[in-house]
Image (tube, grey):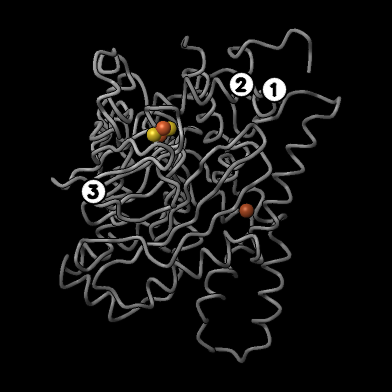
Amino acid sequence: MPLSPLPFDQLVRPDGVHRDLYLRPDVFRAEMARLWSRTWIFAGHESQIPAPGDYVTVDLATQPCVLVRQEDGSVRVLRNRCAHKGARVVSAPSGNTGGFFRCPYHAWSYRTDGSLLAIPRRSGYEGTRLHDCPAGAGLVPAAAVESYRGFVFARLTGEGPALRDHLGPMTEVIDNLLDRSPTGEIEVAGGCLRTVVRANWKIYLENINDTMHAVTAHESASSAAEAVWAREPAGTPKPLAMQQLLPFGSGYDFFQKMGGRTLPNGHTLLGTAFSLHSAYAGMPDYVNALVARHGEARTGAVLAFSPQNAVAYPSLSLKTAPQAMRVIRPIAADRTLVEAWSFRAKGAPDELLARGALYNRLVFSPLSVVAHDDLHVFETIHQGLTTQANPWVSLHRECSAEEDEPVSRDVAGTSEALMRHQYRTWSAAMTVGD
Ligand code: FES
Ligand SMILES: [Fe+2]
């Protein structure tokens, strides 16, 4: 590292980013404080905590937190840090705490809203200033928690727009996920695939909007699928795995035409016209159930909208056709936890959930035939950027030297405009002081 590192406002250019933005621990710490803690980040799905007292533990912006259902049905996000001496109050990944949390160290206990309920031998605090200081207030809540149709987001610190205003057109993607349910309800199902990637979180997030890599990085997966499928007699119905893997071999032209869109606040939509998921075989029982809810025309429109990836910057990526979500949870400058979840559309045939869960296993699991291609590249990027070479990463594809890029616009599916858009949002957040 240079003795005088570049200030944050010099790490992003209109057509590229400096390697320090991925590598420097001080940049990572600032990202957590200035970007991740101050914006709406995905905390969890309400279906994970259906009953009062249900909780899940989760690290948000590297801060241990607990997401917990209240008696009145609302959801709170609390720092999972005991008000007494800082012990982790809840260690299990999920469960039901009943009416209160109890710290395992000295048994301070807290109501599910975080307020202090009891302290053993409380008389020892009589005449002290405990209740005038933060320790007396209990577990520290997130500055704001809101749910959009079951998707719970938290803003850890500061003030900002309402969640709905922050999400803007991204709400239509969540609406589509629910519209794809014959009952209008979805729930997480089928478990979660967790992968710790040895690379910076932004390398992962860039890749979600990178169609140019599929032709090369996933060539072994798509060509293996093509070779297996070529042995089948013509007219054989494609099994789910073939429906999901064969499209990875689509060429540059396909990816270019799928289209992309930049949206306010760093959000992006890839696959505005069609996607790798568009040609999945119909499921007649499922389609009939949707028609009963929406009618023919609207069902057609609901199923036609199947983006490749919709990113609620910076923490969440959704797919609506295989009903799947990826959640990005940064750990350190060179470590990122990625969670892959599936949704069950309530009232839909089990085959629909099987399609989403299979997609996660085939494409997002490191034991699959696709994800290991990406993981290998992510890790070599993180290592490669440390070499004494050009310190700038190129984002020039379809970047005009003359024009400023508008916040919201449609671009080719192969454009790097979606990545540049993320970095403009990053830069704006990072150059506002602590
Ligand atoms: S650290 Fe939690 S009760 Fe002491
Ligand atoms: Fe990939």
Q: Which of the two discs, 1 and 3, labels the residue nearer the N terminus?
A: 1
Identity of the residue furthest to the bottom in this view: 233
Locate residue 233: give its quadrant. Answer: bottom right
| Residue ID at (64%, 18%) | 11
Q: CA distance from mark 1 to mark 3?
A: 38 Å
- Counting the numbered discs, the total is 3
Residue depth check, mark 2 versus mark 3: number of the one nearer the observer: 2
For badge 1, the amino acid type reads Asp
- Report the residue marked by disc 3: 149
Q: Which of the two discs, 1 and 2, labels the residue nearer the N terminus?
A: 1
Residue 170, percent from left and from top:
33, 41
- Report the residue marked by disc 1: 20
Q: Secondary structure at mark 3?
A: loop
Q: Is mark 1 within 8 Å of ligand 2?
A: no
Q: Secondary structure at mark 1?
A: helix
Residue depth check, mark 1 versus mark 2: number of the one nearer the observer: 2
Mark 1 crowd level (few <14, some 14–19, many ≥20, 10 Å Cα): many
Locate residue 156: give its quadrant. Answer: top left
Residue 215, percent from left and from top:
68, 56
- Report the residue marked by disc 2: 27
Residue 282, percent from left and from top:
37, 76
| Residue ID at (51%, 33%) | 62
Give yes or no for contact between labels 1 and 2 (Cβ–Cβ under 8 Å). yes
| Residue ID at (25%, 29%) | 162
Image-based side of 96 in relation to 358, left or right: left
